[in-house]
Image (cartoon, rainbow, N blue to C red):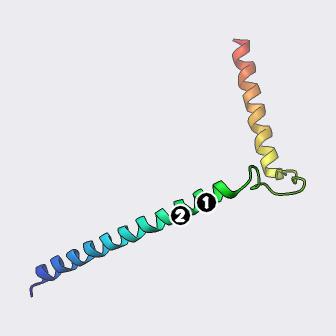
Amino acid sequence: MSWQQSLRAAIRSLRTEEQRILKDLDSVRDHISELQSLSKESRPRGSGRREGPRRPRRLSAKGRTAISRAAKRRWADYRAQKGK
């Protein structure tokens, strides 16, 4: 068997394997969608939320600095446009 024939056989084998995997993937996706639809139907509205008070969000010092600089830059641009 020449190297070209071996290559063709390998490609044919890989394509067959690809088709099998795609079929399995479709089956897995079907099962996932079934489970999702079941969970949506049986779950009361809003039950996905966490119980208890929500923790306040905190910005890092670096984040606050970045926001401050951006705001100052926007105001400077606004004032420059207004002064024209």
Q: Quadrant of residue 67?
A: top right
Crowd class of label 2 (few under 14; some 14 to 19; many from 20; radius 10 Å): few
The kind of residue on which mark 2 rests is Ile
Residue at the spot x=16%, y=76% of the render?
8
Q: Answer yes or no: do the residues labelled 2 and 1 have beta carbons within 8 Å? A: no
> Which of marks 1 and 2 precedes in the sequence?
2
The kind of residue on which mark 1 rests is Leu
**What secondary structure is found at the residue carrying circle 2?**
helix
The quarter of the picture where the N terminus appears is bottom left
Residue lying farthest to the top in this orientation:
84
Q: Which residue is mark 2?
A: 32
Q: Quadrant of residue 37?
A: bottom right
Return the x and y of residue 80 as percentages of the image width and height: 72, 19
Say left or right for 3 vs 65. Answer: left
Say left or right for 51 vs 46. Answer: right
Q: Which residue is mark 1?
A: 38
Return the x and y of residue 60 as percentages of the image width and height: 82, 53
Residue lying farthest to the left in this orientation:
1
Q: Nearer the viewer, residue 63 or 10?
A: 10
Residue at the spot x=71%, y=24% of the render?
77
Eyeballing the image, is 74 above or below 63?
above
**What secondary structure is found at the residue carrying circle 1?**
helix
Q: Nearer the viewer, residue 4 or 62?
A: 4
The quarter of the picture where the C terminus appears is top right
Return the x and y of residue 50 as percentages of the image width and height: 81, 57
